[in-house]
Image (cartoon, grey):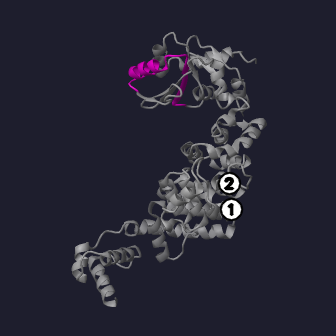
Amino acid sequence: MTASSTEPRHAVRLYRLLRRHPVVEALAAAAGPTPTHLVGGLLRDRLLGLPSRDLDAVVAGRGRAIAENAAAALGATLVPLGGKEFAAFRLVGPDWVLDLWDRDGVPLEADLARRDFTVNSFALALDGGRLIDPFGGVADLGRRLLRATTAASFTGDPLRVLRLPRFVAKLPGFTADPETLALARAAAPGLAAVAAERVREELALIFKSDEAARVLALMAALDVYPGLWLGAPGSPGEGGAAVRELSALAGALRELAAVDPAAAAAADRLTARLAATFAALPAHAGAAGTRAAAGVGEPAVAARAATVDAAVRSTPAAEAAARFAAAGYLTRRVAERVQRVLAEPILPTGELVQRRFLHRLGELWPTAAVRLGAAAAADPPAHETWRRRLRELAALAKRAGAEVFDPPRLLGGEEVQDLLGVGPGPQVGEALAAVRAAQVEGRIRTREQALALITSRSAAG
């Protein structure tokens, strides 16, 4: 296939599939005689028989007018994306998104050349259905091959180093071209200069996937893991332990589902998977931490990391997670959840300690449990101990319920003040906290017992 050849069979198939799509019809009507092409993932996914809610198109001028007219016809929200640098627009509908790029003055093939992989670098003309495939993307689809569109695919945007393993996992049966792997590995250090929010979004997509273990294995082969986690993307490292733990998470979830289906359904898979990657970092990770994206120095990162609650930074892995979040690669909420899970070294035994564990973690207890089960999977005696304690925890969680997770308030602050003969202050808060802790531990359940506890504390003090 030559640089300007077409594939009539694929063109006809795509044109029939897409031309009557209501969004495509509205776009064609808004564009009128302006050359307009569908590009990117929509074409790829439809040829592979995969669903897609995202559409991409390029127009040769009049981008804003076309976007406004199409948005009005579809009742969609219009969001300008390009600012002063380029004309790009996003139309958001109830169950679809259309990204429209105005290539004003740029040849179509040059526009396709800037795209990441050949399977995303062909276009379908809305006027007549001609397929333009200068880089052999359709043939690569048939070979189930991910290949860089040009030698500059990764240097132009190093974030594509992360997209490569994500696409390998996302697209069924796909492998990466060896030369493309080499290009990606060489570009991995450039991830340090990518805006942190872009890296964060890509990592979220990776770790929400059930293929996260497979993706991480390829990230390790590309020298992204553990380097990115330690602030040095491109540095070679060993990712085997994290890949093994990620692979074992599914089994731990199944075992939890066998004893408590509701708890398994509530387990936060994203948090568990991220926790596994931090747990497997080298021992010095907590001290070394991570660097921020370009322009943010180590002192600034350390200062922001220091604001994280010390109670969830009690391990080197949890400290590394705090610094990763300070660098902008995790949201604060996700990082705190990861840290809380990492702060638990084992599933506890004994009802008193188990009650405290369940109360401390709350809704995260199933997440921590499956993460610890995955960590123990390679050691049969440790795994059997985990199974036994998991059954005990699940039974206690069902039996104790709100008594452990959110015990009812037995006394108010004014009652405690009257009982102790004091005004508002820390003494009242300490007394109420003691009552709540005793409720969690199952030692008191009534208002009378709470009053007795406070009275005894006051007498002892």
Asked whether 442 or 215 is in front, the reply is 215
| Residue 217 on image: x %, y % | 70, 49
Instruction: Tell me: residue 282, above or below residue 436.
Output: above
Is residue 181 on the magenta stretch? no
Residue type, numbered disc 2: Pro
Instruction: Tell me: residue 188, above or below residue 125.
Output: below
Location of the C terminus (image quadrant): bottom left
Q: Which residue is drawn at 54% across and 26% down?
A: 56
Q: How crowded is mark 1: few (under 14 residues within 10 Å), some or many (20 or more)?
A: some
Q: Residue at x 58, y 69 (%)?
A: 345
Q: Is mark 1 on a helix, strand or loop?
A: loop
Task: Report how far apart the C-alphas of labels 2 and 1 lie in the structure.
Answer: 8 Å
Determine whether label 2 and label 1 are within 8 Å by CB. yes
Q: Does 326 sit left or right of 429 as displayed?
A: right
Location of the N terminus (image quadrant): top right
Asked whether 261 or 129 is in front, the reply is 129
Q: Does 401 sit left or right of 180 as displayed?
A: left
The residue where tag 1 is placed is 282
Q: What stretch is highlighted in magenta?
A: 52-76
The residue where tag 2 is placed is 226
Q: Residues within 10 Å of mark 2 (few under 14, many from 20)?
A: many
Q: Does 57 sit left or right of 453 as displayed?
A: right
Q: In the rendered image, is residue 47 in sight?
A: yes
Q: Which residue is drawn at 65% across and 53% down?
A: 247
| Residue 344 on image: x %, y % | 55, 67
| Residue 250 on image: x %, y % | 60, 54
| Residue 119 on image: x %, y % | 67, 28
Asked whether 216 or 312 is in front, the reply is 312
Is residue 56 on the magenta stretch? yes
What residue occupies the far bottom of the structure in this picture? Answer: 460
Q: Residue at x 65, y 21 (%)?
A: 110
- Quadrant of the rendered image containing residue 314: bottom right
